Amino acid sequence: MERLLEHAERLGLGPWAGELAALIARKQRYIAGVDAKARRYLDTFASLPEGAPASVELASDRVRIGDPGDLDPASRETLRAALGDYRPWRKGPFALFGIELDAEWDSSLKWNRLREHIAPLAGRRVLDIGSSNGYYLFRMAAADPALALGIEPYLTNWFQFRLLQHYARVPQVYGLPVRFEELPDMAGYFDTVFSMGVLYHRRAPLETLAAMRRMLRRGGELVLETLVIPGEGELALCPAERYAKMNNVYFLPSVPCLEIWLRRAGFTAIRCVDVSRTTGAEQRKTEWVNTETLEDFLDPRDPEMTIEGYPAPRRALLIARNPG
Ligand SMILES: C[S@@+](CC[C@H](N)C(=O)[O-])C[C@H]1O[C@@H](n2cnc3c(N)ncnc32)[C@H](O)[C@@H]1O
């Protein structure tokens, strides 16, 4: 976290350095003092073995940090135990000093669906909202952005990121354990904002989209991925309680409805580049996941429906521009 402040001037973050410093200090106090799980995560972090990867590979589907030979066997076992403490590993895959972290989600599939459609990330300032353990930040870094900043409030995911970056040390990549709403008003700072798997968690999606647009420079790009319902009507589903067992899902629009939301939030050049049903090839149980997964969320008699009777998860990927 401090590294972002150290590099604030170089990254053009000077106007917000004070607010960012206060936010980071608040989060550090929270992690160290309030939350028992976070304190355990800190202890685990302190027990990590020393190790420097001879090489890091970010451009392949499986992000590879080091090789088995870069760490002695005893240290590898210590590391494996730490990785176990940080379960569940939702996003991946990673290979860390030869330990295969096969996460619940094969996140390479989403990245491969979007990579050809976005503006090249070289030299850009990129924000990833809901960056989880940083899988996409690492993939972005392969394109040499000026900055790939991930924000992820859920501490298990953020500690996973911290562990991976502790070893990978990718210079352009930074992560903060904060919510989007907590960021300073960094109007016009970012060239690209990613929001993937976040919008359906928001009670006021139009306001969230407008707030994302505000963070973008004129001509900057939003990469938006969210759950949608099938159909051409300008409609959104609002689940009565849960959707696929999640209790924090508010609105699932059709693609035409989502395009309207983007337009009404001020975006232009709106393109839907993909709609995919989520399958068991993309989301499934692995040894690194100790929770339920997609197959538990679907109706066992009709996998086209969720267990609550709603259309099964499908996700749309849209790209839009801030006209300024
Ligand atoms: C469904 S996951 C998607 C992760 C990743 N972006 C992807 O597409 O695979 C949603 C993530 O957003 C995070 N999140 C939820 N609310 C958020 C908020 N207000 N600001 C930033 N991140 C948030 C969650 O903790 C979670 O890691």
Image (spheres, grey):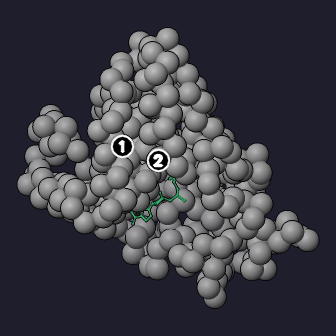
Circle 2 sits on which residue?
A: 86
Q: Which residue is mark 1?
A: 44
| Rendering coords of residue 62 (x, y %) | 59, 29
Extreme-bottom residue of the structure: 240
Residue 34 has which mark?
Answer: none
In the displayed orientation, state which residue is furthest to the right: 301
Q: Nearer the viewer, residue 107 or 272?
A: 107
Q: Is the residue indicated by label 1 positioned so its CB lies within 8 Å of ligand 1?
A: no
Question: Quick one: label 2, few (<14), some, or many (20+) residues within 10 Å?
Answer: many
Residue that appears at 46% across and 79% down: 203
**Residue shown at the point (63%, 59%) measured from the top left:** 291
Of circles 2 and 1, which is in front?
A: 1
Image quadrant occupied by the N terminus: top left
Are the residues tagged 2 and 1 within 8 Å (C-beta)? Answer: yes
Q: Is residue 323 left or right of residue 238?
A: left
Residue 88 shows in this picture: yes
Q: Is 124 on the left-hand or right-hand side of 109?
A: left
Which image quarter is the C terminus in?
A: bottom left
Seen in the picture, residue 73 relative to 154 is either above or below; the reply is above
* Amino acid type, label 1: Thr
Q: Earlier in the sequence, mark 2 or mark 1?
A: 1
Q: Amino acid at mark 2?
A: Tyr
Q: Position of residue 38 (x, y in %)?
A: 33, 56
Q: Position of residue 52 (x, y in %)?
A: 36, 18
Residue occupying image coordinates x 25% and y 50%: 189
Depth check: give the residue in front, 208 or 287. Answer: 287
From what the image shows, is residue 230 above or below residue 188? below
State whether residue 261 appears in this view: no
* Label 1: few (<14), some (14–19) or many (≥20) C-alpha neighbours in 10 Å: some
